[in-house]
Image (cartoon, rainbow, N blue to C red):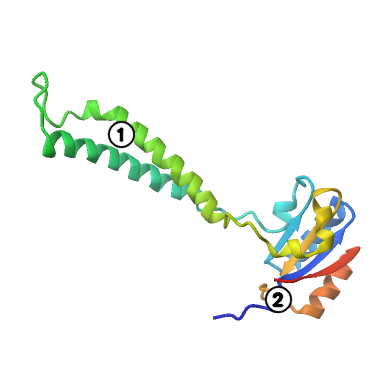
Amino acid sequence: MNPIPPIFGLMGEFDDEQQLLAAAKRTYGAGYRRVDAYTPYPVHGLAEALGYFRRNRLPLIVLVGGICGCLGGFLMQYWVSVIDYPLNVGGRPFNSWPSFIPVTFELTILAAALAAVLGMLALNGLPMPYHPVFNVERFAQASRDRFFLCIEASDPRFDRQATKDFLEGLGASHLSEVDH
């Protein structure tokens, strides 16, 4: 079990999006992987510069949710109509699968949508009412006109002094230690 590092990470403040984008590319190129950027508006190319181009598991979660909803809807109707309470309505067979299609379809969509929402929340680590970067006083400017790049202490390449020197070399106008 890894002990909790004494700080969450180091954060560099940049004046504009071009500096941040260049810094993010150099940071990823230097081998740092536990990195995040905070900007007042979306910056084109920043996600790719930080290495967030991997495939995610959400489509698989939605597919599994849809299949479970489909099977659950059909089996529920089959159990009610054939096993638990069979009724002979108009001489049709008990397992009249064409009449099961609307409910099966609706439960497929419902289960897939719920899986999408819950999967998205789980994969994003939400809800997260608190994040350590809020401990930095200057971080309030992130929603106005400042750009921040944070290298987390949990990164395998993180060394407090070496990372601080690296961020200074990127042209950060201000450096901050992010406490837990």
Q: Nearer the viewer, mark 2 or mark 1?
A: 1
Residue 123 visible at all: yes
Which percent across, then down, holds residue 46? 74, 52
SS class of the residue under badge 1? helix
Q: Quadrant of residue 102?
A: top left
Residue at figure coordinates x 70%, y 52% from the top left:
47
Amino acid type, label 2:
Arg
Disc on the earlier residue, 2 or 1? 1
Where residue 22 appears, x then y in whole percent? 83, 57
Q: Quadrant of the N terminus?
A: bottom right
Q: Does residue 171 appear in the picture of this structure?
A: no
Q: Secondary structure at mark 2?
A: loop
Q: Residue furthest top?
A: 90
Q: Is residue 167 left or right of residue 85?
A: right
Residue at the spot 12% in from the left edge and 39% down from the top edge: 83
Residue 73 position within the rendered picture, expressed as x and y whole percent measured from the top left: 29, 38
Residue 170 is drawn in which quadrant?
A: bottom right
Image point 81% across, 53% down: which residue? 142
Circle on res. 157 = 2
User: In which quadrant of the rendered view does residue 15 lie?
Assistant: bottom right
Question: Residue 140 bears which disc, if any?
Answer: none
Type of residue at label 1? Thr
Nearer the observer, 162 or 87: 87
On screen, residue 31 versus residue 74, left or right, reads: right
Image mark for residue 104: 1
The reply, left or right, for residue 146 in relation to residue 123 is: right
Q: Residue at x 68, y 61 (%)?
A: 131
Mark 1: few, some, or many residues within 10 Å (few <14, many ≥20)?
many
Image quadrant where one finds the C terminus: bottom right
